[in-house]
Image: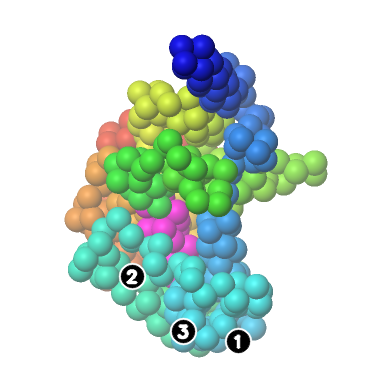
Amino acid sequence: MKRYIISVLAIAALTTAGCRKKKQDQKVPYDNLTATTSYHETFKGEDNNSSVDIYETSVRQRMLKEVAEYMQVFYVTPLNADRMKRMFTNTDAPYIDSTLNNITNISLYEATAQSAGGAVGDAERQWFLSMFDSLAATSTHALETAQQGVPGAIGGTFLINGKGFEQGQFLEKGFIGAMLLDQIANVYLGSEKMAADNTNPVSGKNYTQLEHNWDMAMGYLSQNAYYPMQAADGTWQEYFLGDLVRQVNGLYGNPSELYLAFLKGRAAIVNKDMGVRDQQIATINKLLERAMATVAVSYLNKAEISFTDASRFHALSQATGCIYALRWGHSGKMSREKSEELMGMLMNSTYGFWTLTKSNTDAVKSFLSSTYVIDIDSIVNS
């Protein structure tokens, strides 16, 4: 009997040692991570296949690209507000890409302003719906020349309302904030999803729920193997938030630092090192907000040196959209109320951008510069 008990204990010890070794094999050394490390190939489950699943973020990025592309066809035919709303809610097959129409359980609507919840979230989503109406109404003037107080096309390229406001640009930047930035900073890197199980694989998957939540945050920044990714011909392969952050390089920021924080945070989850993970969350939130603020200041500076109303209004519309987007930053440095105040300083003169004064743009730049500790004269690459 004693020999039997000893044998059982020995087998158990060997089995436990084997399990420990298996878990150790899954660890990812931080020193192995570089700016060109493949996110998807670095993290693997026990089946040795990639444990990164960002399908849902991929679908929403594709949906948003179709919305952005559709908003640019105003010069062909007036935009249809109902179609844009159906693209937002993914109802009644609104997309050209039929595969998107077949995905009935994912929409832009449900992922927009998600962290706000309740009446505030509803109000934000309703704002997007109302903006589709406004943009569609403006598009009926696409064949007219815009003037002060009169909507139409300007510079042969941009569609603006009577206040010089390019609604399509504002909507695009609005989605960058209310969906992409919010999903990263407040939803998937937020306290609730970062408290998910990190011991047992999700049923039928080769990743834990915590690993998956982190990957979803990364997916809303970029879909590529590493970030930022450049094609052989030099063109950047990033879109929306990933593209804006990518521009802030050199003196004013470093997108590779942001990517390394995502890599290191994911490795920390694999390594069961929550202290390191939390450090990376703080870095990611800081860099995302700082980049968005820098881009906003850059657009305002570009507007001040623009030679045409068309380029000036285009830059001002982008800047205003970025200021809206900053309200979705995790730090709370840009409250909803402050965001509205700054946007009003740019838009609320009698004829909007047509009569905007330099003192107002300077005041907005001053706030952004001091709040996010960035260069007030920054101009970043496009």
Indicate which label's residue lies in the foreground, 3 or 2.
2
Q: Which amino acid does label 1 sit on?
A: Thr
Does the segment drawn in magenta span residue 13? no
* Element on which disc 1 rests: loop
Query: Label 1 vs label 2: CA separation?
Result: 26 Å
Does the segment drawn in magenta span residue 168? yes
Residue for badge 2: 125
Badge 3 vs badge 2, beta-carbon distance below 8 Å: no
Q: For residue 48, which numbered disc appears in the image?
A: none
Q: Quadrant of residue 369?
A: top left
Q: In this view, does 374 lie above or below 79?
A: above
| Among numbered discs 1 and 2, the one appearing first in the sequence | 1
- The span shown in magenta is 165-182
Q: Position of residue 303 (x, y in %)?
A: 46, 52
Q: For residue 81, which numbered disc appears in the image?
A: 3
| Among numbered discs 3 and 2, the one appearing first in the sequence | 3
Query: Label 1 vs label 3: CA separation?
Result: 12 Å
Residue 295 is at least partly visible in this image: no
Give the residue at x 67% y 48%.
237
Q: For residue 77, which numbered disc appears in the image?
A: 1
Q: Where is residue 37 in the image (x, y as percent from the top left)?
A: 65, 29
